[in-house]
Structure formats: C-alpha cells, structure tokens
Image (cartoon, rainbow, N blue to C red):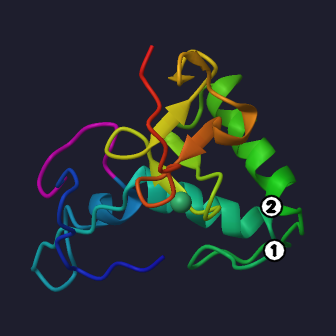
Amino acid sequence: MSCTGKIKEGIYNCFGEYDEAMCHQCIHNDQPLDGETRNCFVSYRDKIEELYNYLRGISLPDGVGVKMPKLSDKMAFTVIWLLQEHFHILPDNIEKCRGCRELFDSDSEGYCLTDEYTLNGKPLPQKYRGQWCNACVPKVEFESP
Ligand SMILES: [Zn+2]
C-alpha cells in the first residue's frame, strides 16, 4: 500500500495528530523530505487487508522483501482472527463478510447476526448468521435482540 497523499473521506484523519492510530507513513510525514505534509492515514481495514493478502500469497506489503506463505482464505483469516481475539494485537472490528468475502470495518458498517436475532419469532436460521457487510446483509425482516 503506497501513500497517495490524498485525504480519504469518511475516516479518521491523522494529519498532524499523534496517537497509537498513526501509521508508519504519517510518522514519516512528520518531517517530509519535500517540506509538504500530507495526510497518508491508512485505516486498520486497509492494513489488515494488506496482511490478509500477504498471508494468502497474493502480494507483499510495499518495501518488504520476505517469503510469502500461501494460506487459503480461511486459514489466512483464522490467523487474523487469532491476532484479534486471542492476542489482542489487531483491532477486532475488522471483519470478513460472509457474502462477498471482503473485509469491512464493523464500527462503520455491517451486521453481526447471531442466534440472538429472530425471524418470524424464531431464532435466526443458521444460513443468515455471521458477519455481513451492508451490501450483502440478507434481505429478510430479522429482529434485533
Ligand atoms: Zn459483503
């Protein structure tokens, strides 16, 4: 993932801010070579997608030259899940959509449908359960717990 220098819309802007969310690119922008600071914030969703692509043997992160594993989609996301839910190294709000299989930020979109949801007064059937992005969420009249 390269720094585009463009301000991404709809996400936290770390331009000039210093906290744990600041990305490697922004740290470099603290003293840019050309004297021009840029907003190069990279969201956790994008960073985790980069890791996901690395684990699946699809692409190396920019500037990195190491061997790539070639895990299945499921195994690659299992590694990410472990880093999120057991080790708490990665934020756990980045989910994989059950429909389109793309990653999404559940803090800003999507649904986590569990058996606590109901459909026609009964627990939501298994086929509707799981993580869904806004575009893929089943178009049924489920009710929240
Ligand atoms: Zn989706």
Cβ at disc 2 under 8 Å from ligand 1: no
Secondary structure of residue under mark 2: helix
Task: Please determine whether, in this image, residue 124 is positioned above or below residue 108.
Answer: above
Residue 5 image position (x, y, % from top left): 22, 80
Q: Main secondary structure of the magenta part?
A: loop
Residue 123 image position (x, y, % from top left): 63, 18
Residue 78 image position (x, y, % from top left): 79, 43
Query: Which residue lies under the disc numbered 2?
Result: 73
Query: Which residue lies under the disc numbered 1?
Result: 57
Question: Pointer 2: residues within 10 angstroms few (<14), some, or many (20+)?
Answer: few
Q: Is residue 144 left or right of residue 62?
A: left
Q: Which mark is residue 121?
A: none
Q: Is residue 73 left or right of residue 43?
A: right
Q: Is residue 21 left or right of residue 106?
A: left
Task: Please determine whether, in this image, residue 75 is positioned above or below residue 64.
Answer: above
Q: Earlier in the sequence, mark 2 or mark 1?
A: 1
Residue placed furthest toward the front: 120
- For the record, the magenta segment spans 14-22
Please say whether residue 20 is one of the residues in the magenta stretch.
yes
